Image (cartoon, rainbow, N blue to C red):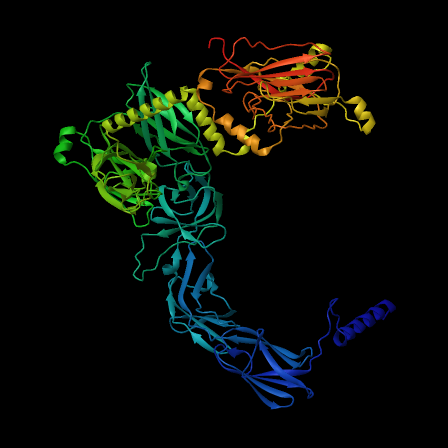
Amino acid sequence: MNLPSTLWRFIIILLSFSIKHFPLLPAGCQRFIPLGNLTVEPALPFLIGSNLTVYCHTKECKRGFRISLELNGETVNSLKKVNCTTMMFRLFNVRMPRSILICELKGVDQKPQTVNGLDLHGGLPPDKPEHIMCEMSRSSDFIDCTWERGQKTHILTTYNISVNRENGTQILLDQIQDAEEITIPRAMIDENTKYQLIITAYNHFGASQSDTFTFCVKDIVIPETPCIMQIEFGNNSMTAILQWKTSESSEHLRSDVRLRTDNAAWEVGEETELSEGLIQVDGLRPLTEYEFQMRTCDTSRSNSSKRSFCSKWSPSVAGRSPGKGPSQQLHVWRMLGSLGTNGLRMVTVLWQPPSPDDYTGAVQQYKIFLGNDQKQEVTGCAALSPCSVQVPAEVQALSISAVTLYGMSPPANVPLRLSGDVRSVLRLLAPAANGSAVFVSWSWPGKKHRSTSGGEPLHYVLEWTSVPAAELQWQKVAKDQDNTLITGLTAGVRYNVSLYAVTTRGVSAPSSRLVYSKEQKPVCGPNVSVLVHEARRIQIQWDELPVDKQKGFITNYTIYLQMLDFSNTQLSKMVSASGPRQMWLDCPEGALALQLTASTSAGEGQRGNRICSQPETPAGLVIWTVFILTLFIAIIANLMCWSCVRERIKQKCISWGPAWLNETLPKPGNSNAIRLLEQQYESELSFSSTHSDPPLSPISLISQEERDDVYPTIHVETSQVGSRPTEPTAEIPLLMSDPGTILVDSQPEHVNYKPQIATLAPQGGEVKETEEEQRDLPSFWEEDRCVRFGVLLGGFLSGVEVGFTDPPLGLTLSSDSGLLWPKTPKTTIALNGGFSLERRATENDVEADSLSLDLQQGEIMTPDTADTCSSQYTVQTTLKSGYFPQAAAVSSTALCDAQR
């Protein structure tokens, strides 16, 4: 023994020892160390459906742990404790042939510990082998015998095959396991001798023997197995043609074909034998992978045992069916347009797409032809319906076909001719319960009408559209039907349903009806208007509701009348919808409010617009009312033309109104001081003529001595002419300004501006009396159109000391003309400061005032007093020195109009 052989022997022994005592484990696995064992009674394998008893034994008793058992992951609750280390479990009616048992130790808050595990194996006894059959072909060297073994046993089952001659001599004994066929060499069999075949099956739970099968060679010979040479699919992909051959004559042979897809179960095909060696299989699906097999059967041999003498199935041949072109005609319809001036008619062709089961792929286009021969193509439309074409008026029909990648559908006839036949009649249109469908039925005229017209019905076309007009929908119905169901309708929408009969002569006239799939209440009421409203009756008219607002067939209208007086009485009247929409109604006297509602079979809808009306006024009353109003306005207008009436109305309104209404705002544009300043400075200063007062002089504080030197003293002297001596005078210091002389001759239209006024007589009572006297002047003063003007003198009066022996003279300014009205009959006032005032009055105290100004430093102007009134006053003013920027109205003169 050499060294290499010894070394190899040592390595082998070492590896064998390590594998036996220290087996290698896969990476990540741990060696399981059992904590006990499991035993099952009865012993395994068990008979399926039996009860089992399982014992779980632990090697040691552990306090705080309990023994539990799980069967296929579920805890077994039927248990009994034997001792501290053993627990017994009961399993009832175990039906699963393979199960897993696991015994564990479980403790509180402890991880479970596995004690041991066990696989349960169950089984059944074998069934009796049945349907034994032996077959062989003429050229075969073996006899093939098969049988059916029955239900599955789940455990190893052995089959013993015994072949004996009819005299009992055994020629073959064979044994196989879990099989259903066996091959017997043909050399062992004599063709003229009968043999017996017996099959016995046995396993752990028992044995079973078949019946004796007797056979001889001539009885088991079958035809040779055919061979499929080629597969061809038809144009419509619904058929396949198999080309096959066999080694023997096919004179008395019948072929069978079976097929399957995707390794599914075999199915018997719908075959048709075309000729010798050719067979057609129908009922295929397009674009599907198929697997075909075929066999032949001998039809010349009698079969008393109903046994078929057929060959074995041929080897499989696979093939894929092509796509399918449409095979059914399209359902078509048309809408005829008007005939044009060029002799062409516009026809809108409608069609329904072919069923998806009738073709594969996608529809590429639809071709429309003139007539049914498909020789002259009119147009090709996209895969959308409808399609409009222009055709000559003499064309009676069109045809249309759907074009796909795998073929074109048969042409469908589109009739254009009107038959003139008696039309079919719609009998019933009944809404369905769900509110989205309508049941339609019709009748076709009797045989006498058919013989007269000569048209036989081909089919019916039912079309419907919503009102107002929307997209047309239609349905083709077979000629043997007299009813159908229209689906997909909307509740509350009116539909116009029409029925056409397509006959051999053309298309009949339509029979049309209106229908609702479900009626609802109207969404609004009609608009009502009043035509005539008399004292106790009224004529009204209302509009018909739009169709989309009706929501159903209107059955009646309800008119609501409501009094607009304190009673608020409401009346109602129901009117049939079939009557006119204009009527007379009896109503109470007075103003009314009207509303209308519409009702359908679903109920009353909402009320319409609310209008108010009152009886018409008689013509005579209107005339008298107009006459009285005209007369009243004429009287008022005539009175307003009288100045005295206007003055009284004005004074009355002023007395009723607030005090500020009697105040007359000064107008700077009427200031003579501003006019003279404008002339003196030649527009050096720009004053607003109407909206601003003259600017004020600067104010400075001076002492008493300076004031005596600067401001002159006004000497006021009052006297009464003719009867009284001159009264003591009063010295009044005046504010000096620029030297100048101002004389204002004011006309009535220029006396609106009233500068700031200084009143020399502050006696409140006397002033009020003067104002009252002024308001109480007779109206003839206005009627004589007297012209009044005032003299405006400017200047600030820093202080006035006036002494009077007679009653004090009140100087005031009228609100309309600036007159100075005296209290005493005669008064003369002399101002030492540069001017004097003198007033003379007659005994009747009706002479007008006169004004004279004596200005030593300026120009002296005397107003014209040629015309005198019956009452005249004269005031003479002399201004010796000084300029008075702001004037005080000291006196006024009223002159009568020259025409008086």
Is residue 90 shown to the viewer in this render? yes
Against 703, residue 242 (above or below) is: below
Left or right, 326 with respect to 73, comes to: left
Where does the image place residue 23, in percent across and percent down from the top left? 75, 73
| The residue positioned farthest toward the bottom in the image shown | 83
Against 421, residue 184 (above or below) is: below
Where does the image place residue 683, in percent across and percent down from the top left? 71, 11
Where does the image place residue 431, in percent across and percent down from the top left? 28, 46
Where does the image place residue 328, in percent across and percent down from the top left? 35, 37
Against 516, residue 827 (above or below) is: above
Q: Nearer the viewer, residue 482 or 320?
A: 482
Left or right, 369 with respect to 173, comes to: left
Left or right, 290 with respect to 498, comes to: right
Q: Nearer the viewer, residue 62 or 617?
A: 617
| The residue positioned farthest toward the right in the image shown | 3
Q: Residue, x 33% and y 14% (percent of image)?
A: 342
Q: Residue, x 43% and y 65% (percent of image)?
A: 147
Is residue 376 shown to the viewer in this render? no
State which quadrant residue 381 falls in.
top left
Q: Nearer the viewer, residue 59 or 17?
A: 59
* Label tally: 0
Quadrant of image for the N terminus: bottom right
